Amino acid sequence: MTTYNLARRPLATLCASLFLITPAAVAAAATPAQSAQAAEPAGAAVLAPRAVLAAMEHVADWQLAHPTGYPRDDWTEGVGDAGFMALAGVSGQQKYRDAMRAVGEHNRWKAGPSMFHADDYVVGQMYAELYLHTREPQMIAPLRAQFDQMLAHPRPGSLNWKTPGVQQRWAWCDALFMGPPAWARLTAATGDPRYLEFAIANWWLTSDYLYDQEEHLYFRDSRFFEQREANGKKVFWGRGNGWVMGGLVRMLQYIPDQHPQRPRFIAQYRAMAERLLGLQQADGLWRASLLDPATYPNRESSGSALYTYALAWGVNQGLLPRESYGAAVRRAWQALAGHVTPEGKLVHVQPIGEDPRYFDPQSTDVFAVGAFLLAGSELYRMGLEQQGPLRVVTVQNGTALRRLEESVEVAGAGLAQGADGEVAVMDALTSRILPSQRLGSTLLFQTDLAPGETRRFLLVPRARLPAVPPLVSRAHARFVPERLDDFAWENDRVAHRTYGPAVMHDAREKLVSSGIDVWSKSTRKLVQDAWYRGGAYHRDQGEGLDFYHVGTSRGCGGLGVDDGKTLHTSRNFTRANVLADGPLRTVFELTYDAWDAGGRQVAETRRVSLDAGSHFSRVESRFSEAGAAPLTIGVGIVQRPGQGSYRQGAGTMSYWEPAIGDHGSNACAVIVPGAGAYAQRDGHYLALASARPGQPFVYYLGSAWSGGGDFAGAPAWETHVADMAARLAAPVTVRVSP
């Protein structure tokens, strides 16, 4: 039997980076704050994040270079994909995420051929996670349609393995990794709680049937209830229980803290973890038969990787004592690293099966690679925390609203870590490094929050990170001199423009307007630069088009000074300045020279910001005027001929426009906190509010398009506007640990 011990390799090889490093070496390089970590017992081996990441990438690269030949929607590939997503969350290389996109596109984002077989929709975990990275709806649309069909036509029945059609239910313990986490992730992606509730209810049906309350382990399926090993003990398959432990973690990552079933999941997780800690072998691994390792002495890396992942996650969450479980996890990771060949092949993998078996030690498989990468992601985080305590950002949603893509701002005082003060944001549940953006002394990132949910994030000094995942900009703004001094801004949902001085003097247009134009998008990509280059943006070429007519109107959210009879509006902006340009927020200022507002000379400086994922731009205007008397500001939405749907509420106006030919309907809304009156005048809906010269006047303008896929019609848009107003009125609470 050939084994691979990396301790015997030359340090020049890449795999030498897989090892733990000694406490003395870390202490020599650590700052005083880093070397003061008190959570680890004295003498504990210290994980090097750079080494862990190198190991993950080495194994992943070998797997990418050696495709399996399985169907790309097969369960084996789906488990591998879960690991590749964990790697994409920490690696600085784009290729891992690109590889997952290629899988999804090859599969047309569909699950496997059997609707109800859990193995056939494990790949949906990757689809949903990739969606959470990119927010591209096509990634989850087929999975959502499938799960909706399953909810409408459930398959109840016995979990006895002899029952016809039993594999349409979660009747084998592996299914608890394959199935429930896909459902939980779809709730995270969509905000629809039905998927998570289905996963939870059916988890416990399976648990009540297959979980041995005395041994705190799962039978693989009902055929094993009466079987015994050579030593007379019950048959508990190593990888099978690894699937369960991995499934528990991947459920707990997406069950909100306040959910009534979360404590039950934690109790089962802890009970199994305690049992498994006692079953770890002296070499750091677990055997194919948990209770009869002597009969099956082969080291087995796939189940061991799943246990390493699950136990490391529990240590990182504070659910398991670091002193005992941390040492076990480090031993397990070192053993797993010793089963990687110099080329990057992970060996000692029990082939596909359902019970303990003998196997060729040279065997490998993609599902084991997935488990290895999942384990590595948690060891990577553990290594970061060993270098010194990390500040914790706690974000609380105190409302009954589901807040998808909520922007979170951390003030400068919470960022004072590291020599340069630069930090990255890690999701405390998934260990993914999140996209973030520094805005002066503020750090911006985004998260999703269930009603009443509290989430935690870690601030990691960038100096500790060997790499930062690539950022894809989702918000952009620029001055467009090549198109008559337009100013354009967009994110992955909406696009707008307004007009500068050149167009006022153009022989063809001579347009004098400070109105807000809308460009209708049907893609999550940023399109304005390409559309300007092409010049054909009045025709839909698969990404949307500009068919909104603003002219001299207020368009969607333009303003003026109202004297009760007339809305006095400025001319085009004269100066533009981009203050921030993505990846999560774009901020810019426009200057409007003084204009006659019914006998008052008023000038305006307008600061606009737009966040990724939002249909609404925030507008903060400051008006300059010689007097101190308040101004009445009218924020307008232009009316269209035909039958649209207009609604107004407390500080809100929403308008679903009449359809224009085959283009469909544009929608607009404004949210004006403190609006005291509403009017219809000169072809506009107006929200009226008071502003004092020199003081900020804040409102929000938003748009949507029926062809964009986000809103099916006026009721959905009106609900979104009301929810947005409620979110603005009750911001999340953000706390940073000292």
Image: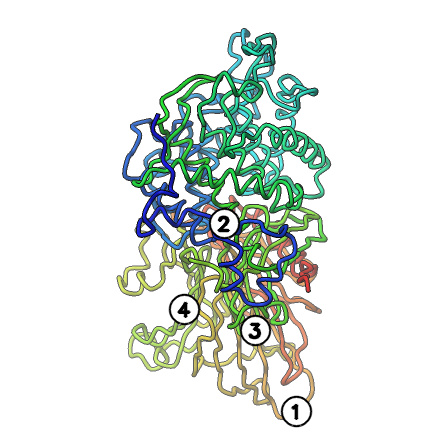
The alpha-carbon separation of the residues under discs 3 and 1 comes to: 34 Å
The picture quadrant where one finds residue 410 is bottom right
Q: Secondary structure at mark 4?
A: strand
Q: Is residue 686 above or below residue 37?
A: below
Q: Amino acid at mark 1?
A: Gly
Front: mark 3 or 4: 3
Q: Amino acid at mark 3?
A: Ser
Say which residue label 2 marks: 380
Compare marks 2 and 4 and give the one earlier in the sequence: 2
Q: Amino acid at mark 4?
A: Ala
Say which residue label 3 marks: 441
Q: Is residue 220 above or below residue 134?
A: above
Task: Tell me the quadrant of the picture where the C terminus can be found.
Answer: bottom right
Q: Is residue 587 left or right of residue 738?
A: left
Q: Is residue 290 left or right of residue 400?
A: left
The alpha-carbon separation of the residues under discs 3 and 4 comes to: 26 Å
Say which residue label 1 marks: 627
Compare marks 4 and 1 and give the one earlier in the sequence: 4
Front: mark 3 or 2: 2
Compare marks 3 and 4 and give the one earlier in the sequence: 3
Say which residue label 4 marks: 488
Q: Secondary structure at mark 1?
A: loop
